[in-house]
Image: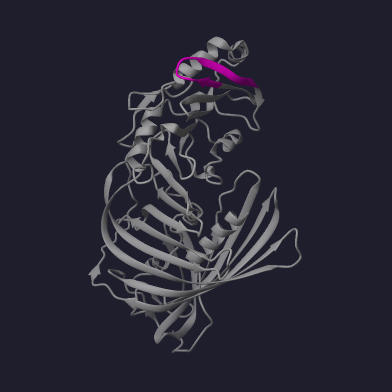
């Protein structure tokens, strides 16, 4: 539960902050928001108070946090997107430092690089690093055409950039705003309605004060659901390209098998220092475009399970070989397949550890009836470890409704190796897992995505996940239809 709370605090720190109103200025003054330049740097002070009420305690837990937020428009940067294509982007940097004032939890630091498409301002890629005292986490999140319409606030739950001061201020660029005005802004395809409350002088800037609310579509996971809302106010000035001030409250409610709790986070953020850049940015208003397939992948038609393929692979016990062995040596599986002629592998888990390879294969079709069989291979002999009939919680999909051509297992490995070089330094064959889920809409597949809890709702219909290492561990999610790298996560313990 502490991890879930830290994620909520992380979202809160990146989304909102502010301080008490100060000063006054001419009411009705129109403020025109100036654009950002490459080289802009802004530092803010941050104060947060978190109040948590749990089901097991009648007394609230109050936690005070101080910190800083530093933002910079770094400039143009060529990156490789989730499809292996090089793109020219604008690199935005945000670093948030939290000082928890507790011996057991002294604080943590989050730094994020967002790579924005100049034609749409949409984040093609975000890279976040979180130093949480005893644990370091890195996230890389890639956006695709299929995911373009997802609410951007959900990305913060994946370690993405969230709504930084740069995101908010750039959405108001060029607008002339005065008291009483209302309108909408669009941030990463999310439409937000705002209202101008009035004018105030803050830090010697004549500002317009703007209010808006943001409902966050927090991803759910098995046994837990969370609702989050955010109400906040921002202060903007004509002669400044970013926020002068932010103030707001995040409220959340979580229901889980461990109990229920509510959290309220009140935050204050105020401009401390700034440096103005000189190079203007030319933004467009088009929707970003993406390739149809990852250039590093391999795609083939499949029958019961995607084939191993022809890319370099550490898998010696092929998925086709595992299925063939199971069909030839399990009368019970053969009986199931006879009565379920349209069945295919809906979930598979390959694992290699200490030179032993295992396959856990789950067969299913459009019914609730399935069959699970676990196989092992020691380099010479195969064996059935366990098997039995299972019942799914929801009906599955027919294979005909799924893509007839999918990424091969070795193609998945090759894509992973192209993106994971900075994280995986040793031979991964000693400790590796590859999960394949052909029908992610089935609730039965959610458990196979436990390595990425709460995130499977954002995936396409078919997906691979790879897990390399124990600790440190690197995890990736890859679209099984297009080969698009969706998410890369690396976790390590700091001694």
Give residue 44's quadrant in the image. bottom left
Give residue 286's quadrant in the image. bottom left
List the single residue furthest toward the left: 279
Estimate the x, y position of residue 231 in percent, counting from the top left. Answer: 56, 68
Estimate the x, y position of residue 120 in percent, counting from the top left. Answer: 33, 56
Nearest to the observer: residue 235 or residue 47? 47
Left-right relation of 268 to 258: left
Relative to 18, is 120 above or below? above
Relative to 361, is 461 above or below? below
Would residue 167 be visible to someone looking at this image? no
Estimate the x, y position of residue 9 in percent, counting from the top left. Answer: 55, 62
Classify the position of the N terminus by image quarter.
bottom right
Write the residue at 61% across / 15% down: 336
List the single residue furthest toward the front: 495
Which SS does the magenta portion mostly show?
strand
Left-right relation of 446 to 74: right
Give residue 217's quadrant in the image. bottom right
Relative to 426, is 89 above or below? below
Whether the magenta-drawn stretch holds residue 76 is answered as no
> Which region is colored magenta?
375-388
Question: Is the image coloured rainbow, by chain, by secondary structure, or in one colour?
Answer: one colour
Nearest to the observer: residue 50 or residue 152? 50
Relative to 199, is 145 above or below? above
């Amino acid at each position: 539960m502490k991890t879930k709370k830290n994620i909520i605090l992380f979202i809160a720190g990146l989304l909102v902050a502010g301080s008490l109103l100060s000063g006054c200025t001419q009411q009705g003054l129109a403020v025109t928001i100036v654009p950002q330049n490459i080289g802009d740097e802004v530092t803010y002070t941050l104060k947060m108070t978190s109040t948590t009420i749990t089901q097991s305690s009648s007394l609230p837990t109050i936690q005070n946090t101080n910190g800083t937020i530093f933002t910079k428009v770094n400039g143009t940067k060529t990156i490789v997107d989730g499809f292996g294509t090089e793109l020219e982007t604008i690199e935005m940097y945000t670093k948030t430092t939290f000082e928890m004032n507790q011996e057991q939890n002294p604080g943590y630091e989050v730094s994020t690089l967002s790579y924005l498409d100049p034609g749409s301002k949409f984040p093609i890629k975000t890279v976040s690093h979180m130093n949480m005292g005893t644990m370091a986490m890195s996230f890389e999140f890639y956006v695709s055409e299929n995911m373009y319409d997802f609410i951007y606030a959900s990305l913060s739950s994946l370690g993405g950039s969230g709504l930084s001061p740069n995101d908010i201020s750039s959405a108001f660029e060029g607008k002339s705003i005065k008291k009483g005005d209302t309108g909408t802004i669009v941030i990463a395809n999310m439409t937000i309605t705002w209202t101008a409350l009035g004018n105030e002088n803050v830090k010697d800037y004549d500002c317009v004060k703007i209010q808006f609310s943001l409902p966050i579509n927090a991803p759910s996971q098995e046994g837990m659901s969370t609702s989050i809302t955010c109400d906040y106010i921002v202060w903007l000035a004509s002669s400044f390209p970013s926020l002068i001030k932010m103030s707001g409250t995040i409220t959340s409610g979580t229901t889980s098998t461990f109990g229920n709790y509510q959290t309220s986070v009140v935050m204050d953020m105020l401009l401390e220092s700034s440096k103005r850049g000189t190079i203007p940015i030319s933004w467009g208003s088009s929707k970003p475009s993406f390739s149809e397939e990852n250039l590093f992948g391999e795609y083939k038609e499949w029958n019961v399970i995607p084939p191993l393929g022809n890319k370099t692979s550490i898998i010696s016990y092929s998925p086709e070989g595992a299925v063939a062995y199971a069909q030839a040596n399990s009368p019970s599986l053969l009986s199931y397949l006879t009565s379920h002629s349209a069945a295919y592998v809906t979930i598979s888990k390959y694992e290699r550890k200490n030179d032993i390879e295992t396959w856990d294969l789950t067969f299913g079709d459009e019914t609730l009836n399935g069959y699970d069989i676990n196989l092992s291979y020691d380099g010479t002999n195969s064996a059935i470890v366990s098997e039995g009939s299972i019942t799914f919680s929801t009906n599955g999909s027919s294979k005909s409704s799924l893509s007839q051509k999918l990424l091969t297992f070795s193609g998945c490995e090759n894509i992973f190796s192209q993106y994971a070089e900075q994280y995986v330094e040793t031979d991964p064959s000693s400790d590796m897992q590859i999960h394949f889920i052909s029908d992610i809409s089935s609730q039965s597949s959610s458990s196979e995505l436990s390595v990425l809890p709460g995130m499977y709702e954002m995936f396409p219909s078919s997906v691979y996940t790879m897990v390399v290492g124990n600790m440190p561990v690197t995890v990736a999610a890859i679209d099984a239809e297009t080969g698009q790298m969706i998410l890369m996560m690396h976790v390590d313990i700091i001694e």
